[in-house]
Image (cartoon, rainbow, N blue to C red):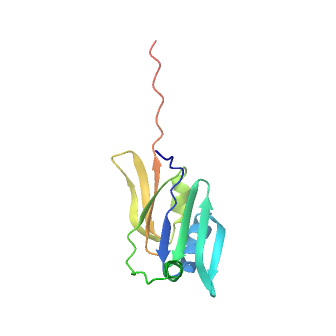
Amino acid sequence: MAEMKKLTPVLVVEEIEPCLGFWMERLGFAKTVEVPEGNKLGFVILVKDKVEVMYQTYASVEKDLNSPVKRREPATNLYIEVKGLDEIIQRLAGANIVVPERKTFYGAREIGAAEPGGNLVVFAEFEKQEPPMNAD
C-alpha cells in the first residue's frame, strides 16, 4: 500500500481576503504561497507549526477545471489539536464562536469558531495523561 504522508484541507470560498485575518492575525499563521487571480487572491497556503490550510476561490477552481463549479454553503469542519487552548480562546475574542468552550466525554476541552468563509474550526486540547504509578 502507498504511504500517506500528509492531509491538507483546501477551503473553497468566494473571496480569500476576508479569511486571512482569522488565521494570520488571530492565530499567527503565515502565508507561504499566494497566487493572484486578477486584482484579488485566487489561492493561498497558510502554515503554523504542523498545521497547513489552503484557500482557493470558486473563480480559481473554475479556471483550473475550465468548467463552472456549483456554489454551496460551507460544510467543512476543521478539528485542530492544540497545546495552549487558553491562548487560542483569548485570540478568538470577538470571533464568531459557534461552539462555546466545553469539556467533552473523550477528554478534550474545545472551542469552535466560524472563520469568515463560513467553515467551522474547532480547537481542542486534551487532558494530560498521568504516567502509571510504579508497583513495587
Residue at 52% across / 66% down in the picture?
Answer: 92
Residue at the (48%, 74%) spot, across then down = 12
Which one is nearer the viewer's eye here, 1 or 123? 1
Image point (48%, 70%), residue name: 11
Give the image quarter of residue 73.
Answer: bottom left
Name of the residue lying farthest toward the left? 105
Q: Is residue 116 visible?
A: no
> How many marks overall?
0
Seen in the image, is 38 located left or right of residue 114? right
User: In the image, is residue 132 above or below residue 126?
Assistant: above
| Extreme-top residue of the structure | 136
**Residue placed at 50% from the left, 49% from the top?**
4
Q: Position of residue 39 (x, y in %)?
A: 63, 87
- Quarter residue 41 falls in: bottom right
Q: In terms of depth relative to the viewer, which is nearer, 65 or 40?
A: 65
Image position, residue 128 (x, y; %) = 48, 39
Residue 51 at what x, y percent from top left?
A: 56, 57
State whether residue 38 appears in this view: yes
Q: Is residue 98 left or right of residue 64?
A: left
- Against 89, residue 37 (above or below) is below
> Residue 10 at what x, y percent from top left?
50, 67
Quarter-of-image position of residue 16 = bottom right
